[in-house]
Image: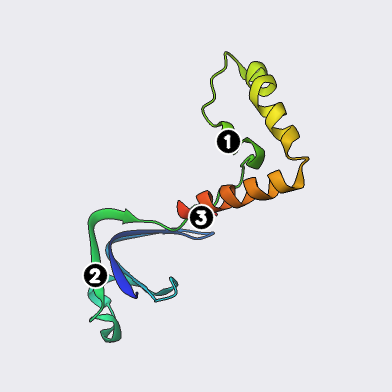
Amino acid sequence: MAKILRGQLVNFSAHSIVHIESAGIVVNDDGRIAWRGEFSQLPTQFKSLHIDDHGKRLLLPGFIDAHIHFPQYRMLAAPAKDLLEWLHRYTFPEEARYGDESYAASAAEIFLNRLFAHGTT
């Protein structure tokens, strides 16, 4: 369902950071952004849409995790006294399981679904 998100917009580009204190983002039925900018400048064609008002909360783009260890996601926060113990107790045995193609495929589906569900690509 198309709607408007209202709040503070923070957007990043290669050369700048854009901050709009009273912003609106129009999201189409397919989840794509149709418009963004100062809420006071909302185009007429979108004014009848439902508004999800987030007050002064930040509206941010999805995050890109450029450094992630896919085979290690199942052992986050696993206890160990140091890195070597953690690697030997959890990491190396788990990574060895990825030699099984069906295990790796199942784990990949869960991993990617969790990233996407939390806005990380």
Above-or-below relation of 71 to 20: above
Viewer-side residue, 6 vs 76: 76
Callout in the foreground (2, 1): 1
Name the residue located 63 percent from the left edge and 35 percent from the top edge: 72
- Residue at label 2? 51
What kind of residue is marked 3?
A: Phe
- Residue at label 1? 74
Callout in the foreground (3, 2): 3
Where on the picture, by quarter, is residue 100? top right
Name the residue located 58 percent from the left edge and 47 percent from the top edge: 111
Callout in the foreground (3, 1): 1
Image spot of residue 28 (x, y percent): 39, 76
Q: What separation in Å lies between label 3 and label 1 (alpha carbons)? A: 16 Å
What kind of residue is marked 2?
A: Ile
Name the residue located 54 percent from the left edge and 53 percent from the top edge: 113
Furthest-front residue in this view:
102
- Residue at label 3? 116
In terms of secondary structure, where does tag 1 sit?
Answer: helix
* Contact, mark 2 vs mark 1 (Cβ under 8 Å): no
Image spot of residue 116 (x, y percent): 51, 55
